[in-house]
Amino acid sequence: MNYDVVIIGGGPSGSTAGSFLRKYGPELNVAIFEREVFPRDHIGESQLPGTCAILHEMGAWDKVERAGFPIKVGATYRWGRTAELWDFEFFPRQNFRDEPRPAKYEGQRRATAFQVDRSIYDEILLDHAAETGCQIFEGTRVLEILRDGDRVTGLKLENGDIVTGRYYLDASGHSGVLRRAMGVQVENPSSLQNIALWDYWQNADWAVEIGVGGTLIQVLSLGYGWLWFIPLGPTRTSVGLVIPAEYYKKSGKRPEQLYAEALAEDERIRSLMRNATSEGLFQTTRDWSFIAARHFGENWFLIGEAGGFADPILSAGMTISHAAGREVAFTILELERGTKDAKWLKDQFEVRQSSRIRNHIRFADYWYVANEQFADLKEYTKEIAKDVGLELTPEKAWQWLAQGGFISEDLSIGTGTFTLNALKALGDYLHEVEIESPFSKYNVFRLDLSGATWSDRARYLEGQVLDTPSYLRGDRILPVDGVFDLLLNILQRESQLPRIVDRLKQVGERFGDDFQARSNMLVTAISGLEALALDGWVKPSYDPSLPIMELKSGYFAIHWNQDPPITTSS
Ligand SMILES: Cc1cc2nc3c(=O)[nH]c(=O)nc-3n(C[C@H](O)[C@H](O)[C@H](O)COP(=O)(O)OP(=O)(O)OC[C@H]3O[C@@H](n4cnc5c(N)ncnc54)[C@H](O)[C@@H]3O)c2cc1C
């Protein structure tokens, strides 16, 4: 019972960490202790495409695909300034082609996600971790953390056995057993204090269509909360209600009653569920956002929900958890190599986790504040707004979000979940705020790195942690990598927009006949330039001797929902 790495919890973060440790460090002895015997149900079913990239890298995408989970291409919302439904798509549904399944992780499937039945999904991943060589102990609860100061010296199991390791990972989700034992405080950076109530249903309508197209999660506001409707498989659907804890207390009603009333009240859900039967697995949980004050200690790390949680409104929890599992594995592998400063590696891990969770909490706050459908929750959203220093106006909410910086540590342009263009387009659906593109009135973009400092940030690649140089200014970060590296190179020589675009086109020629790759590069670069301007790294201006160019940056698909009306009488 002595291992290199001991992982508490066999959920997605634990099995991801274990699989990556063994993939890139096959000499490591890794054990996962899971208190349940899988399969077991778990909440957190609707994913984002970022998860698929990680599944693919860890060698599990084909296995997950083989299970035939519904493919997710986006979300249908009743949220924002009108009660009309609108869709947000990662991949345009009208372009989505049904392909025989199991398919490969290529083409359109790189832009889609899954809606997963966690009882099946988590078991596939834990089995995958076992196949990579992790030792798995199911039905084995970790009872006690043995410690000496900030150092974990062992784990005591329910049967009294002691397990030791050189590194310990807390992947125990909401339980956070190691986090609590080490006395790590948690911060609640939001006033969002919601509870979730949910059940699983057989034969809800749409189930018949599952697996033959791109599905969308339904996120539908009620005046006092919101409903999720997630198809999980050919006959199974997860339907949940999220309401403020305070609303529940004041209602004086039992959770089951509130849940039944909400389902009956919403016409769309009522119609979808007219032939459905409950599996009788009704559950509730509180889902309050939090972030751990520390994410590592002398020989331990927190990953997944043990380290923090953002409100489920953005379906980002699983992406955050898988990413943490991957990054902790790369961090440990690098610590083992011993060629990089250990403190730097751990600090980078912590900064990455905590800013990723914080961004999502911030975004969730914005999402709630900007929803005018919460007729009964005006006071509640006002409080959230006040908490983050906003007056309750959608304009202020958007500006505040935009001030957070568009260039994220994940090297993506947007806020991790949404691309920059999608964020701008959301303006139309959430409220009437026009977000002006700098391309609409400027044609000169001059690099401005004044006051910026230079430091190395971690980049997680193929089992390694690389140091990527970055500029830092205030809370803004500019990684000198990928598309930003390219743009900085060009911007050091050119500032006139037509010449910048010409340079980008020249770079695009490297892709030869691969039109798709060329246009992806151009679109990302244009989006990157826009983000540089919005984040203040370039100063835009207008030169009357130059044309204004109409540049469209990035793909997004947000539009009013076009589903045929669903009625109870049909
Ligand atoms: C209401 C709600 C809705 C959500 N919806 C979504 C969504 O739509 N999309 C999304 O991406 N995310 C969603 N999430 C978040 C998602 O559930 C989590 O991000 C995800 O499950 C975290 O994975 P994890 O591996 O860190 O923890 P978990 O999945 O919770 O796994 C932890 C494992 O540790 C085990 N364990 C606990 N204690 C011990 C112990 N003492 N000894 C041994 N084993 C132990 C548990 O049995 C469990 O299997 C939602 C969360 C909530 C609360």
Image (cartoon, grey):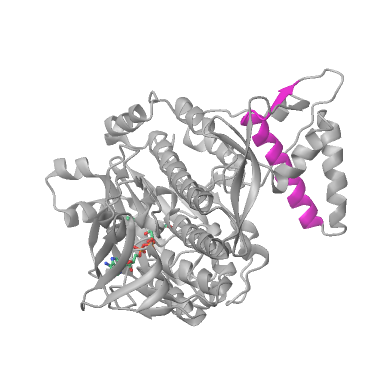
Left or right? Give the position of 375 relative to 333: left
The answer to which of 58 and 502 lies nearer the viewer is: 58
Depth check, front residue: 215 or 407? 407
Residue 511 seen in render: yes
Q: How many numbered callouts? A: 0
Q: Residue at x 51, y 62 (%)?
A: 326
> Residue 132: x percent and y percent?
51, 79
Q: Is residue 358 above or below residue 255?
A: above
What residue occupies the far left of the structure in this picture? 252
For this rendering, which residue is in front, 452 or 369? 452
Question: Which of the 4 image quarters holds residue 278?
Answer: bottom left
Residue 71 drawn at (x, y percent): 52, 66
Instruction: Please identify the quadrant where the N terminus is shown.
Output: bottom left
Closer-to-camera residue (288/550):
288
Quadrant of residue 256 within the rendered picture: bottom left
Depicted 419 relative to depicted 342: above or below: above
Tell me where residue 417 appears, x and y as whole percent: 52, 48
Q: Which residues are magenta?
A: 515-541
Determine whether 172 is above or below 487 in the image: below
Q: Quadrant of ligand 1?
A: bottom left
Q: Please provide percent x and percent y for residue 76.
A: 47, 51
Is 517 one of the magenta-colored residues?
Answer: yes
- Identified at 37% across, 51% down, the residue is 308
Apparent side of residue 218 relative to residue 254 in the rendered image (left or right) = right
- Residue 326 in magenta? no
Where on the picture, by quarter, is residue 53? bottom right
- 147 with respect to 423 (left or right): left
